Amino acid sequence: QLQASGGGLVQPGGSLRLSCVVSPFTLDYYGVGWFRQAPGKEREGVSCISSTDGITYYGDSVKGRFTISRDKDKNTVYLQMNSLKPEDTAIYYCATDSGPLCTVIGDSLRFLGEFGFKGQGTLVTVSS
């Protein structure tokens, strides 16, 4: 079970922090992260943190602006989003990868909620 929260309306340049509460032990066995989907667009991998060593991965469009972290005691994964842009507007979904590692192809994160578990999304709207 994954429960995402923290979405909302924010102005360009602003910040939001998303939270994803997961079932106990999920962070011990699965990479966990976020993908997003905007209306009329394909899913896009945003970020993932691996279970085994906590290595983090980011999609190219959010590198340097978003930060993923986890708190195992609280069974929670966070996504700190800074310098938000209108093109970041989307529904953000929390999901697990198929195993403890995050799927990376070449140098690119592939995290689209195709495997593992995913929860309900939270809407992020960046607009003035």
Image: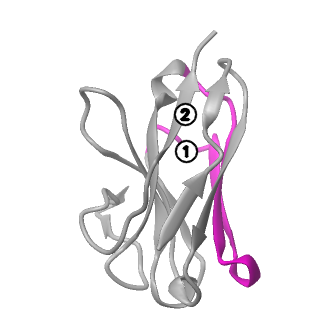
Q: Is residue 105 visible?
A: yes
Q: Which residue appears at 63% of the width and 40% of the height? A: 65
Question: What residue appears at the point 37 percent right and 73 percent down from the top-left corner?
Answer: 97
> Percent x, y for residue 10?
67, 24
Amino acid bearing label 1: Lys
Query: What's the mark number on residue 124?
Result: 2
Q: Is residue 124 left or right of residue 106?
A: right
- Near mark 1 (Cα within 10 A), the count class, few <14, some 14-19 or many ≥20, is few
- Helix, strand or loop at disc 2? strand
- Residue 35 appears at what percent x and percent y? 41, 51
Q: Is residue 96 magenta?
A: no
Residue 68 figure quarter? bottom right
Locate residue 27: give its quadrant.
Answer: bottom right
Residue assigned mark 1:
63
Q: Is residue 65 shown left or right of residue 62?
A: right
Foreground label between 2 and 1: 2
Vertical arrangement, residue 44 with respect to residue 116, above or below: above
Q: Quadrant of residue 102?
A: bottom left
The numbered dot on residue 4 is: none
Q: Earlier in the sequence, mark 2 or mark 1?
A: 1
Provide residue 115's location: percent of width, then percent of height. 26, 71
Q: CA distance from mark 2 to mark 1?
A: 18 Å
Residue 52 in view = no
Residue bounds of the magenta highlight: 60-85
Instruction: Give the residue at x 45% y 82%.
Output: 30
Q: Amino acid at mark 2?
A: Val
Q: Is residue 69 magenta?
A: yes
Crowding at mark 2 (Cα within 10 Å: few <14, some 14-19, many 20+):
many
Q: Nearer the viewer, residue 61 or 119?
A: 119
Q: Position of residue 106 (x, y in %)?
A: 29, 63
